[in-house]
Amino acid sequence: MTLSLGLENIIVSENDISLVDGQKGHLVYKGYWAKDLALNKSFEEVVFLLWNGTLPNDIELKVFKRELSHSMKLDENIKKIIELLPANVDMLGVLRTAVSALGTENFSWPPTKEQGITILAKIPAIIAYRQNCLLKKEKIEPKPEFSLTENYLYMLHGKVPEKTHVRALEAYLVLTAEHGLNASTFTSRVISSTQSDMASAITGAIGALKGPLHGGAPSEVDNMIEEIGSLSNAESWVRNKLENNEKIMGFGHRVYKTRDPRAEALSIIASGFKEPWFELSVGIEKLILKLLDEYKPGRKLYTNVEYYAVAVFRGVGIPKELYTPTFTFSRVAGWVAHILDQSNQNKLIRPQSKYIGIIPKCEE
């Protein structure tokens, strides 16, 4: 057996859900470029694609959107659980607990698309309900005629969202809905491979996403740009970080060895806001790329999705503490696609470990 720490370069699944080509900077969902989907399709259309393999026709989309919007409403017992959690429990902890509470007999093996609809629809509702509890604001119920994205912004802000804001956030949700066997997706497949229920698999995936090496980077990008403050201060700030061998947030990726295609699409979307913060982000990006090439030649450190995700979040009014929960909302679509795929070709995932400890002497 070959040892591969972190399972790097090990293929453990063969599926048609997505292609992540780190060398070429390609991201494909079910035969479509993710960038094209983000710029031209709604989140619901892409979720349907990931779960069914084809884009929906008009009737299928209408039915699917209705099923999702009607599933957003939270039961009173889930609301009570959310309300009873201490204020110092972070949002991913809340999501993990609330999704776990959804795991009734309706979520027994094998997983179904109907179960996926229930969980995906309730994630943004849970986030908004908890946020309004913490801020002591009115608890706003979802509107059945709104899409998931419209309802998410509506429940957070208490007003009908602008169309440009809905389109921008939808593009983000599409671009981060699926990304191969990342840590949280792999976790969901491992749990599902034991024939555990979908709610348990999603709960485990949320736990994996909670780690800062996976889901926590957007807020750190925000902090970095805030700390830099202006282009005139940027070069000295970045040089100081690089000379002290500190990480520059929003750059570099475990898979991509060129610019993250999701960053490319989000920069196009974010440019529509025409705000000073976006212009500052563009200027800082150019400078950081230049200095990374100077200090770390050959490392191939390029802009990743988190960098321009912040510009989109700021543009649509998502507060910093909800960056990673919003990422969770989008990624549920991919988790469900993988859980369904795992159940269709199920084999218990059980890799080996290599023992390097002491072997006791044989008994005489």
Image (cartoon, rainbow, N blue to C red):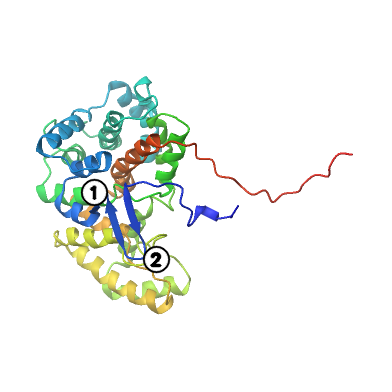
Q: Position of residue 281 (x, y in %)?
A: 25, 66
Above or below for 15 versus 144: below
Residue 247: in sight, yes or no? Answer: yes
Q: Position of residue 100 (x, y in %)?
A: 39, 29
Q: Position of residue 263 (x, y in %)?
A: 27, 61
Residue found at x 34% / y 56%? 20
Q: Give the structural element (helix, strand or loop) at label 2.
A: loop
* Disc 1 residue crowd, few under 14, some 14–19, many 20+, Cα 10 Å: many
Select label 1 or label 2 by which is in front: 1
What label sits on residue 174 in the rendered view? 1
Specify the quadrant of the image occupied by residue 311: bottom left
Specify the quadrant of the image occupied by residue 115: top left
Residue 90: in sight, yes or no? Answer: no
Left/right of residue 155 with respect to residue 253 in the rendered view: left
Q: Residue lying furthest bottom in this view? A: 294
Residue found at x 48% / y 70%? 245
What label sits on residue 12 in the rendered view? none
Left/right of residue 64 with respect to residue 196 in the rendered view: left
Q: What residue would you read off at disc 2?
A: 248
